[in-house]
Amino acid sequence: MKKFLNDPQYFVDEMLEGLLLAHADQLKSVREDNRGLIRSDAPVPGKVAIVTGGGSGHLPLFLGYVGKGMLDGVAVGDVFASPSAQVMLDVTRAVNSGAGVLYLYGNYGGDVMNFDMAGELAELEGIRTETVVVTDDAASMPKGQEAQRRGVAGMFYLYKLAGAMAESGASLAEVKRIAEKANQHVRTMGVALSPCILPEVGRPTFAIGDDQMEIGMGIHGEPGIERGTLKTADEVADILVSTILADLPCEAGSEVSVLVNGLGATPLEELYIIYRKVHLLLAERGIRVYRRYIGEFATSMEMAGLSVSILRLDDELRELLDMPFATPFRVQN
Amino acid sequence: MKKFLNDPQYFVDEMLEGLLLAHADQLKSVREDNRGLIRSDAPVPGKVAIVTGGGSGHLPLFLGYVGKGMLDGVAVGDVFASPSAQVMLDVTRAVNSGAGVLYLYGNYGGDVMNFDMAGELAELEGIRTETVVVTDDAASMPKGQEAQRRGVAGMFYLYKLAGAMAESGASLAEVKRIAEKANQHVRTMGVALSPCILPEVGRPTFAIGDDQMEIGMGIHGEPGIERGTLKTADEVADILVSTILADLPCEAGSEVSVLVNGLGATPLEELYIIYRKVHLLLAERGIRVYRRYIGEFATSMEMAGLSVSILRLDDELRELLDMPFATPFRVQN
């Protein structure tokens, strides 16, 4: 296992310490163990708060999206493990300004169970909560079973759009409506070339042949829909785009936002080679890319691979997408 | 070779096409082959222009730093190969507004030869040019032979500081002075865990044992100063920081900026574990980190490894560091 590590059992603790030392002006901890982090200006008076959470190992997901125009707080779990309901509750209390809290996170069993429990406990304390579970991974379940799909890189768009809505002073119901709408408007398809290595385990999460790729693999190495020989970049782009568009029809003349997300080890050069073909394929169908994001947005440590997310825009979503945000990992003016 | 590629010989061309499709609002091409890119608003009237260049495979270096507050243009070479003098000259002509052009690039033989030739040709056309060659890699030559060192991730700081100076309307001599001063004030030390794979070659650039690391390795796989067994993250941080500070003394009470740069495959989590220790080691010496950058700033495709750069600040450099910039890859408000 070639990693920059000390004792693997302190991997998350030391990562969080580094993060808080680096971004003390933007983030603050609400717990001695640093597993709950919030915006440094939280609670923001009168604003609906948005809280996410999930396992570690996906930076900049999840905690990298805490900041103005995005999220208010995050519950941080161990590597690929859900944070506890208690951490979620602590974060909820710390960000609540009285306008309510939206739980916005990916569809994984442990996270759902714990956020539901945290929400019930918060309600007992008089804190209103609502929940939107992100289910953008088109590969994880067939059409018609969207609610059971996993949440992957498209989560970025839900944070961005709901975050912009909350920042504008909208009500909890309105912020929830935007998150649900964004979830309906976004689909992601990923492809993996190599596994990642969990620090505490020290070996690859799965095996894949030197000439193989897996389409539809999840960000924890969950099985995809097809394993086959390595295809060209253009063929990969074609499979991802056509699968997404079969699931999320976009008419000629429509506008979308595209996210090409690196899973960890894939060079930025290759993400641009993929973006090139995605852009051209959409252009052939008369679909315009209004705004694009290319880089690492939701990783699986050192996994080689990438995902493409497409967000279908309308006037409301376009306006929210254009609003600025500032997090430790990314700034949009 | 597990890469998202089409024909390897079009790797750079397709990457550039993707980049121009993605960032048409910020970048424009000055050549049919796209090997010369400039700011979309170049030439900026009255402003000293800064031009860089180098081989591909290091994104966001070099072309990712073209933008307001940073660079005006870039000459793009093949993977790990210098661009031609003709490309550099084309970029020079396209960014020149009459206030002169600073060539600012890393100390590699081909780049030096070609930029010198481009500068001579530009002078014949009446375009004033000056040159500052970046030599921040403390591992590449011993103290006393600083001018022969390679340029690596610390180049980011020269772009940032000289770019801010040029944006403020300073003269060519003043912009050059700041670039030289920044070069004297910054040192970088890298460590590699794995090689990268050149698309056209298809095999690793060097071999390294499963339990080994190489300290001081260059961003093209140039040999470092020590190959040994894998050390802990804290030990690595200690070696990098103490080597840098032996070369670049920073007194107690001084302020620095720190850049922890991922070489490609190393997870962001691990960069934060390294930053944590760097921060603590500096604090022990009474050195304050005024501003830090953590992420991928100068890569070697999918190489696993990282570098630490330390920039010693004074009032002038701090003020320039704080100025905003906006490039396709990073925004600072």
Image (cartoon, coloured by chain):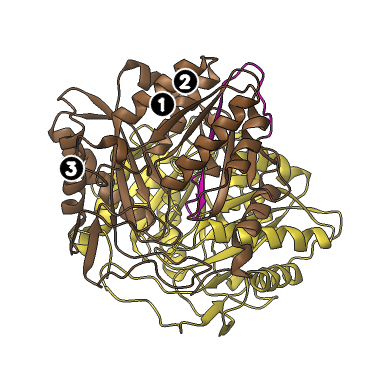
Chain colours: A brown, B yellow
Residue linked to disc 1: A179
Distance from the alpha carbon under mark 2 to that under mark 3:
29 Å
Chain letter of disc 2 in the image: A
Label placed on residue A175: 2
Residue B163 visible to an observer of this rendering = no
Q: Name the residue located 75 percent from the left edge and 72 percent from the top edge.
A: B246
Chain where mark 3 sits: A
Asked whether disc 2 touches disc 1, contact meaning CB atoms under 8 Å apart, the reply is yes
Under mark 2, the amino acid is Val
Position of residue B50 relative to residue A245, above or below, is: below
| Quadrant (top left/top right/bottom left/bottom right) for the C terminus of chain B | top right
Q: Is residue A60 visible?
A: yes
Total numbered labels: 3
Label 3 crowd (10 A; few <14 / some 14-19 / many >=20): some
Q: Which of the two labelled residues, at mark 2 and mark 3, occupies the earlier sequence position? A: 2
Residue type, mark 1 in image: Ala
Badge 1 crowding class, 10 Å Cα cut-off, few under 14, some 14 to 19, many 20 or more, is many
Q: Position of residue A305 (x, y in %)?
A: 32, 57
